[in-house]
């Protein structure tokens, strides 16, 4: 069974899933899974946030230049989303 990989195109910013050649330098079969991947990450973080007292959850990564990248989900009550 082929090993599947995910990758982001540096040109189009599209997220692809598929298989690579043996050298892992070129896609052999790939599909655009951008919307599905983003929805899966959203659902994953939402479920984790459901268990947190402040209804938010996320990940943080360090950048080479000393900065940070944060990926966060915060669940807003219905009252905060009405008339927004």
Image: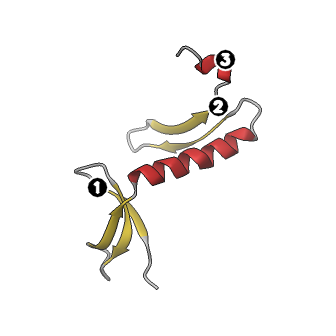
Q: Is residue 71 above or below residue 80?
A: below
Residue found farthest to the left: 11
Q: CA distance from mark 3 to mark 1?
A: 39 Å
- Which quadrant of the structure image shows residue 21? bottom left
Of badges 3 and 2, nearer the viewer stands: 3
Q: Check disc 1 and report the residue beneath it.
A: 9
Q: Is residue 8 above or below residue 75?
A: below
Q: Indicate left or right for 78 with 5 as reference.
A: right
Of badges 2 and 1, nearer the viewer stands: 2
Q: CA distance from mark 3 to mark 2?
A: 12 Å
- Rendering coords of residue 79 (x, y %): 66, 17
Q: Residue at x 54, y 52 (%)?
A: 40
Q: Earlier in the sequence, mark 2 or mark 1?
A: 1
Q: CA distance from mark 2 to mark 1?
A: 30 Å
Of badges 3 and 1, nearer the viewer stands: 3
The disc label shown at residue 79, or none: 3
- Rendering coords of residue 84 (x, y %): 52, 16
Secondary structure of the residue carrying tag 2 is: loop
Q: Check disc 2 and report the residue beneath it.
A: 75
Q: Residue at x 59, y 17 (%)?
A: 82
- Rendering coords of residue 15 (x, y %): 36, 55
The disc label shown at residue 74, or none: none
Secondary structure of the residue carrying tag 1 is: loop
**How busy is the neighbourhood of tag 3: few (under 14 within 10 Å), some, or many (20 plus)?**
few
Whether label 3 touches label 2, CB < 8 Å = no
């Amino acid at each position: 069974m082929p090993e599947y990989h995910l990758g982001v195109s540096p040109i189009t910013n599209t997220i692809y899933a598929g298989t690579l050649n043996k050298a892992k330098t070129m896609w052999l079969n790939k599909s655009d899974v951008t919307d599905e991947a983003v929805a899966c990450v959203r659902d994953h973080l939402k479920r984790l946030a459901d268990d947190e007292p402040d209804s938010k959850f996320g990940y943080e990564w360090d950048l080479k230049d000393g900065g940070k990248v944060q990926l966060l989900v915060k669940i807003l009550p219905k009252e905060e989303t009405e008339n927004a």
